Image (cartoon, helix red, strand yellow):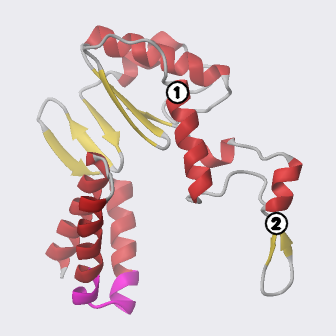
């Protein structure tokens, strides 16, 4: 499991594109985006496309993989995952993409061995492959606690439940992968327990 560091900020925008993304605030100050705007629809498409292009290399048909914007995971035998992770790191370095888990100067073989451990983080959850458990990372837990404080100031539990009901309906209409559904369910379960 690997993810890119400040991924949207790694995509510098050419000057002519920057001008298309310039805006003024309420005080009239002019701002120009120099990198991809995090979360903006087209920016997400660019980031996803780049991640998928980087991980588009031959692998055994017995292997699995998944990605979510700047997160990538390979599943297979230890040997298969080792080779795929090495290739992914090499290809990331070729395009100067920075990974959180691997420094630019770190030996690839050493980095991959370090990454092939018994647990890892994926989309805000810590997976323990030996104990077969999943729990929220501390970072995700802190974000949820902060969000809950903000939500409780402006929304009632019933209103939030309505929002989640719409999300569950949307998941049956649009194609959400399992990781997205899992994150929504985790948040809802945690919120329900706190209310």
Work out whether residue 101 or residue 122 is closer to the camera in this orientation and state it.
122
- Badge 2, how many Cα within 10 Å: few under 14, some, many 20+? few
As measured in the structure, the alpha-carbon distance from the residue carrying label 2 to the one carrying label 1 is: 34 Å
Rendered location of residue 140, percent (x, y): 35, 58
Q: Which residue is pictured at 46% across the width and 10% down the height? A: 109
Which numbered marker is on residue 22? 2
- Badge 1, how many Cα within 10 Å: few under 14, some, many 20+? many
Q: Which residue is pictured at 58% across the width and 19% down the height? A: 91
Residue under pointer 1: 102
Please say whether residue 6 is visible from this viewpoint.
no
Rendered location of residue 94, percent (x, y): 66, 19
In the picture provided, is 180 more to the left or to the right than 21? Answer: left
In the picture, which quadrant includes the N terminus?
top left
Q: Which residue is pictured at 46% across the width and 19% down the height? A: 111
Work out whether residue 12 or residue 21 is closer to the camera in this orientation and state it.
21
Please say whether residue 139 is visible from this viewpoint.
yes
Magenta residues? 150-160
Q: Is residue 80 magenta?
A: no
What is the tally of numbered marks visible in this picture? 2
Of badges 2 and 1, nearer the viewer stands 2
């Amino acid at each position: 499991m690997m993810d890119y560091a400040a991924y949207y900020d790694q995509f510098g925008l050419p000057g002519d594109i920057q001008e298309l993304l310039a805006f003024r605030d309420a005080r009239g100050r002019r701002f120009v985006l120099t990198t991809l705007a995090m979360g903006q629809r087209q920016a997400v498409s660019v980031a996803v496309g780049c991640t998928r292009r980087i991980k588009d290399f031959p692998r055994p048909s017995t292997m699995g993989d998944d990605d979510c914007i700047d997160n990538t995971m390979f599943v297979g035998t230890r040997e298969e995952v080792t080779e795929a992770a090495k290739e992914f790191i090499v290809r990331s370095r070729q395009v100067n993409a920075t990974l959180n888990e691997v420094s630019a100067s770190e030996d690839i073989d050493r980095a991959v061995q370090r990454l092939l451990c018994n647990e890892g983080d994926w989309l805000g959850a810590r997976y323990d492959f030996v104990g077969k458990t999943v729990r929220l990372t501390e970072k995700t837990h802190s974000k949820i606690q902060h969000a809950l404080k903000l939500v409780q100031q402006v929304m009632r539990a019933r209103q939030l439940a309505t929002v989640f009901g719409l999300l569950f309906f949307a998941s049956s209409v649009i194609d959400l992968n399992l990781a997205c559904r899992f994150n929504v369910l985790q948040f809802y379960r945690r919120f329900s327990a706190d209310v």
